[in-house]
Image: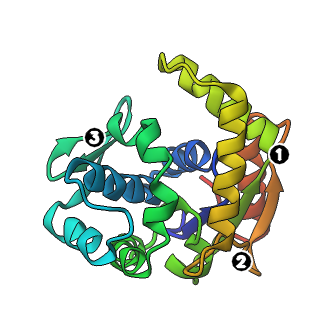
Amino acid sequence: MEKIAIAIDGPASSGKSTVAKLLAKDFHFIYVDTGAMYRAVTYLAIQHNVPFDRETALVQLIKKYPISFEQTANGQLVFVNNQNVTEEIRQSDVTSAVSEVSAHGKVREQLVHIQQELGSAGGVVMDGRDIGTTVLPNAEVKIFLVASVEERAQRRYKENLSKGMTTDFDSLKEAIAHRDYLDSHRTVSPLVQAEDAVKIDTTGMSIDQVVAKIQEVILEKGFEIT
């Protein structure tokens, strides 16, 4: 199909990454996991004992330790300075601090520049919090995924169990609600639906149903799916 850019935004555990990966695979597009990039910076801050409120020091980490991705048969791997940190950036200490780190304007500016370079040629699926509004404002297709806090907590709970991670469900639910508040109320690039984005409530929907719905949107916009 035509090398368009697909921007998928939404709150935590709304299904963005899973859906984006499947679409990229189906269309033979590049998948850019922007959330993993912010998690990688947070991981670096923890490893190097950099306080989360030290904006300039966080930017220096990005410049010193390049973040990269590698597509494999078993999914996407995330690297920091050529070290595989795919599992490390999903741990609870990173999850609890990533909103604070990603709220810094200069951190976002540095990563957005990298993301825009990746998306400049088209043929990309990119997911995050501000893709349709800030990173790829001219994306041909913009999707905004939402789901109830209850359902998103259930998804994250099952995901953690599958990875052997024991998590208290009520604490997880509270953390997701708090993350929503932080993401939507931050000063720099808050989580907000782009005016030209199509909103899809994924509550009660399977991943295949969500992918099919997005494909419908793409077709309605006049782009062929092959």
* Marks 1 and 3, how far apart at CA: 30 Å
Quarter of the rendering occupied by the N terminus: bottom right
Q: In the structure shown, which secondary structural element does the residue marked by tag 3 occupy?
A: loop
User: What's the amino acid at mark 1?
Assistant: Ser
**Front in this rendered view, residue 212 or 223:** 212
User: What's the amino acid at mark 2?
Assistant: Ala
- 170 vs 30, left or right, is right
Q: Residue at x 45, y 72 (%)?
A: 122
Q: To which residue does mark 3 refer? A: 85
Q: Residue at x 79, y 48 (%)?
A: 147
Q: Residue at x 29, y 50 (%)?
A: 46
> Quick one: label 1 or label 3, which is nearer the N terminus?
3
Residue 225 point in image, percent of width and height = 64, 56
- Viewer-side label of 2, 3: 3
Which numbered marker is on residue 148?
1
User: What's the amino acid at mark 3?
Assistant: Val
